[in-house]
Amino acid sequence: MVKLRLLFVIWTLLLCVLMPLAVHGTTIEQYDNDYNSLSVEQQEFIQWVYDFGKPYNLQWTLAAKVWEESQCGLQVISERTHPVYGKDYGITQINIHWLLVAHNLPDTPFNRSKYATKLVRDDVYCLLETINNIRHWECLKKSWQSYRFVWAHYNGGTTPNWDYAERIAKRIRVLTKYIME
């Protein structure tokens, strides 16, 4: 029985040590290389998003999200489709179902098409919707005092996606070297 408990303790400790490495496996150097492989247009787009977010004090978050979510505007419709909530659209990959819910709009094929098209075609609209969504989660941040909490909930809703939050944090660390303030 003692051996079984000891084995369980060792297994738990190994998981605690190895799990963060698996979840947060991409290094800053890899993100740095990724940024350097972006085209000039993509880097300028990140700069534009950064400048857009400055008055809202969300410049770093928005710039990192656009890089993470749509490869700087190259992929504005997600490849994956959630069986209930549908696809994500725009430069920040906003889920169409939750956009309609946030605006108290009926989830109809017409509304899905109308707002998905708007998210894809209008980067400013997409960024403003993203800001509204971030502000929603910010009200919960006050007790946590961490933007990682906001990013994790932004992506995962009531089930925070901590891996996503870590990726955003790493992208921001890289962007601080390249963005012109």
Image: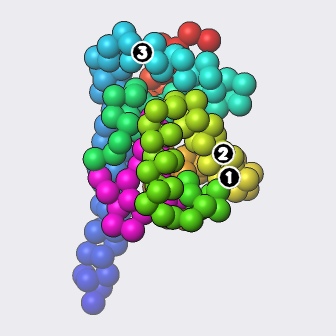
Q: Are marks 3 and 1 in contact (CB under 8 Å)?
A: no
Q: Is residue 86 magenta?
A: yes
Q: How many marks?
A: 3
Closer to the camera, 69 or 22?
A: 69
| Residue interval drawn in magenta | 80-98
- Indicate which disc residue 63 carries: none
The crowd level at tag 1 (other Cα within 10 Å; few <14, some 14-19, many 20+) is: some
Q: Which residue is mark 3?
A: 43
Residue 159 x %, y %? 50, 64
Q: Which residue is mark 2?
A: 132
Residue 95 x %, y %? 46, 52
Amino acid type for the residue under numbered disc 2 = Asn
The crowd level at tag 2 (other Cα within 10 Å; few <14, some 14-19, many 20+) is: few
Identify whether 56 is placed above or below 156. Answer: above
Amino acid type for the residue under numbered disc 3 = Gln
Q: Are marks 2 and 1 in contact (CB under 8 Å)?
A: yes
Identify whether 174 is placed above or below 65. Answer: above
Residue 1 x %, y %? 27, 90
| Res. 30 image quadrant | top left
Q: Which residue is mark 1?
A: 136
Q: Secondary structure at mark 1?
A: helix
